[in-house]
Amino acid sequence: MSTIAMDAPEALALLARIGEQGGAVRDVKARVKAGEAGPAEADAALTTLLALKGEFKALTGQDVPAPAKQGSKKDKKANKAEAGPPPVQMKEAGLNAAAEM
């Protein structure tokens, strides 16, 4: 069986469908948690997602790449603290950009 590159149009289209189905799974799980949907609905959405991932692996020979990890608020605060204070604005520093030219 031959495989195609992950950046081929067919693979990219399948990745888009996987992303959409992943969102649908998250939505259904939230609705189950809120009591607005049953577990069978979540199982069906997850089964569809897993089938799409299986199609991707069969098509490309590779697993679906993990989504980019987003940092938590705690991580963002730590990164901001490490960056130091914001740069001083020219006006606050008493500099006039037009006068320097």
Image: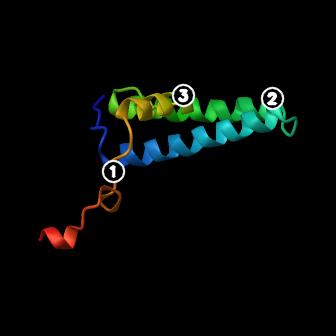
Tell which residue pokes out farthest to the left in this image: 101
Q: Residue at x 29, y 43 (%)?
A: 7
Type of amino acid at the residue the image marks with label 3: Lys
Q: Do the residues under discs 1 and 2 have CB atoms within 8 angstroms?
A: no
- Alpha carbon distance from label 3 to label 2: 32 Å
Q: Which mark is residue 88?
A: 1
Q: Residue at x 66, y 36 (%)?
A: 26
Front disc: 1 or 3: 1
Q: Which mark is residue 39?
A: 2
Give the side of residue 23 with respect to residue 44, left or right.
left
Type of amino acid at the residue the image marks with label 2: Pro
What secondary structure is marked by label 1?
Answer: loop
Give x and y (percent) for residue 34: 84, 36
- Alpha carbon distance from label 1 to label 2: 54 Å
Q: Nearer the viewer, residue 16 or 85?
A: 85
Front disc: 1 or 2: 1
Front disc: 3 or 2: 3
Q: Nearer the viewer, residue 58 or 44?
A: 44
The mark that comes first in sequence, 3 or 2, is 2
- Alpha carbon distance from label 1 to label 3: 25 Å
* Quarter of the image where the C terminus is located: bottom left
Disc 3 crowd rating (10 Å Cα; few below 14, some 14-19, many 20+) is: few
Tell which residue pokes out farthest to the front in this image: 94
Question: Would you place residue 71 above or below residue 98 in this image?
Answer: above
Type of amino acid at the residue the image marks with label 1: Val
Give x and y (percent) for residue 79: 42, 31
What secondary structure is marked by label 3?
Answer: helix
Q: Which residue is mark 3?
A: 74
